[in-house]
Amino acid sequence: MIITQGTPFQKAIDAVESLPFDDREELLDIIKMRLAEQRRDEILANAQEAVQAVREKRAKFGTVEDLKKDLLGE
C-alpha cells in the first residue's frame, strides 16, 4: 500500500505515533475490540438472514456436490 503524505490515513498514523506508548497500546486494544464487535454484528446479521431464508423456504440444502451442480447449472 502506498501512503501519500497528507492523506487522512497518513495523518491518522502520524497522530497515533505522536501518542505515548501506553496510549498507543490502549488505542490498539480499543480498535481490536471494536473490530471484533463489528465482526460479531456482521455474523449476527448473516445468521438472521440465513434463518429468514430458511423460514421463507429460499434456503437450499445438500452436499458440496449438490452446491457445485447448482452453481454450474447442471
Image: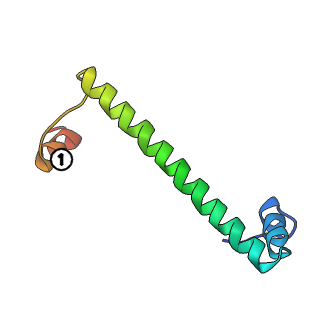
Instruction: Looking at the picture, tell me which residue is in the foreground, 19 or 15.
Output: 19
Q: Return the residue found at the far bottom.
A: 21
Q: Is residue 26 left or right of residue 38?
A: right
Q: Position of residue 36 (x, y in %)?
A: 52, 55
Q: Nearer the viewer, residue 1 or 37?
A: 37
Disc 1 residue type (three-letter): Lys
Q: Position of residue 3 (x, y in %)?
A: 75, 70
In the image, residue 22 sits, relative to residue 58, either above or below, namely below
Judged from the image, the secondary structure of the residue bearing numbered disc 1 is helix
In this figure, which residue is indicated by the disc labeled 1? Answer: 68
The residue drawn where x is 83% and y is 72% is 14
- Residue at 58% x, 58% y: name it: 33
Q: Is residue 11 left or right of residue 74?
A: right
User: In the rendered view, does 70 fall on the left or right side of 51?
Assistant: left
Which quarter of the picture shows residue 43?
top left
Placement of the N terminus among the 4 image quadrants: bottom right
Residue at figure coordinates x 42%, y 40% from the top left: 44
Q: Residue at x 80, y 68 (%)?
A: 10
Residue 74 is situated, as x and y percent measured from the top left of the image, at 13, 39
Label 1 neighbour load within 10 Å: few <14, some 14-19, many 20+ = few
Residue 25 appears in which quarter of the rendering? bottom right
What is the number of callouts on the image? 1
Residue with the most extreme top position: 56
Q: How is the image coloured?
A: rainbow
Q: Position of residue 56 (x, y in %)?
A: 27, 20
